[in-house]
Image: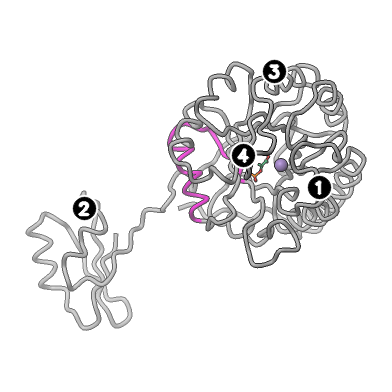
Amino acid sequence: MWLLLKQGVEPAGLLKELQAEGIVAQARKIGERWALEVTENGFTPEAFLRWEEIERVISDKPLFPLVARWQGEVSVGEWRRGESPLWIAGPCSVERKQELLSLALSLRQAGVHALRGGAYKARTSPYTFQGLGEEALDWLAEAKALSGLPLCVEVVSERHLPLYQEKGIDILQVGARNMDNYWLLQEVASLHLPVLLKRNPQAHLEEWLLAAEYLLLHGAPWVLLCERGIRTFERNLRYTLDVGVFSVARQQTALPLIADPSHAAGHWQYVAALGYAALAAGAEGIMVEVHADPLCARSDAAQQLTLEQFLAFKEKAEGLYACLHSRGVAQPLQPRLE
Ligand code: PEP
Ligand code: MN
């Protein structure tokens, strides 16, 4: 920890006072000013501000040590990290059993790595479809048994967690609205399952990574960070996909970073373009909404792709990914590990 002294302050007096408190410190001149390097002492950074000679405390502990230092294996179905983009696809909400089962088989055949599908929905309006709940989880479990695809399903309440465990959900999704619901994060993490953590559209990168820190601290083995668009003044699309965040986040963590172009676009026509942009900007995978009959979907009808649209998108996206990687354009950046 470093204590930066105010301009013109000499260190000798403060060094004596710190010594009297049992704190070992060494003075260094940084440019025109003095700074004191103090060793671990049990004092919080704020505690030093009671000395008025000190202007600022620079903590050398990273804000999110587990996120910054995370190194490990990520396993989602047959995905090989770095070799191809990760694909998580499926309907916004689970609505009809047969439709889900046949979609799951088609997605599996298309090389998707995990199936998504909402059971309990987090809807803006209380008057819109809220999801089929346990019945949807049952059908998802059947779809998993039939297709072999692992399941990625959003959790909206800790009350539902025992059901998610019972039905064999593989990746617990925390939605944009719950990214900073810290008590829910702790409960979700306590299942020791991987978590897909959407970014709250109002959250700074730092807040998003701190939410991931909660998950790692409380037992999640790894976290898939999913950028799904932030709120800006622009209203042509539903949200603004923050493509810059992939390279900045990559400097801070080795956790996998993916994009959800469906919720960012809000309209099926723009989903592919945002997906390509995300991959070019460093996203390692895509979560995308695919529906057997989007026009009849009970949630997010405008943005869901048909299977055919998805297949065309996936094929082009993979071509782009291969091209970017073979030419060294999208080499994964080395995370800065503290
Ligand atoms: C979803 O993925 O179904 C969803 C509700 O997304 P978000 O949390 O990003 O709005
Ligand atoms: Mn949706």
Residue 256 in the figure: left or right of residue 36: right
Residue 146 in the figure: left or right of residue 195: right
Residue 302: give its label.
Answer: 1
Name the residue at 17% across, 73% down: 11
Q: Residues within 10 Å of mark 1 (few under 14, many from 20)?
A: some
Tell me the chief SS of the magenta region.
helix
Where does label 4 land, which residue?
Answer: 126
**SS for dot 2:** loop
Tag 3: residue type? Asp
Camera-nearest residue between 164 and 246: 164
Q: Earlier in the sequence, mark 4 or mark 1?
A: 4
Where does label 3 land, which residue?
Answer: 138
Tell me the quadrant of the picture where the N terminus can be found. bottom left
Q: CA distance from mark 3 to mark 1?
A: 26 Å
**SS for dot 3:** helix
Q: Earlier in the sequence, mark 3 or mark 1?
A: 3
- Please report contact status of discs 3 and 2: CB closer than 8 Å, yes or no: no
x and y, in percent, of residue 247 in the image: 63, 59
**SS for dot 1:** helix
Where does label 2 land, which residue?
Answer: 43
Tag 1: residue type? Ala
- Please report contact status of discs 2 and 1: CB closer than 8 Å, yes or no: no
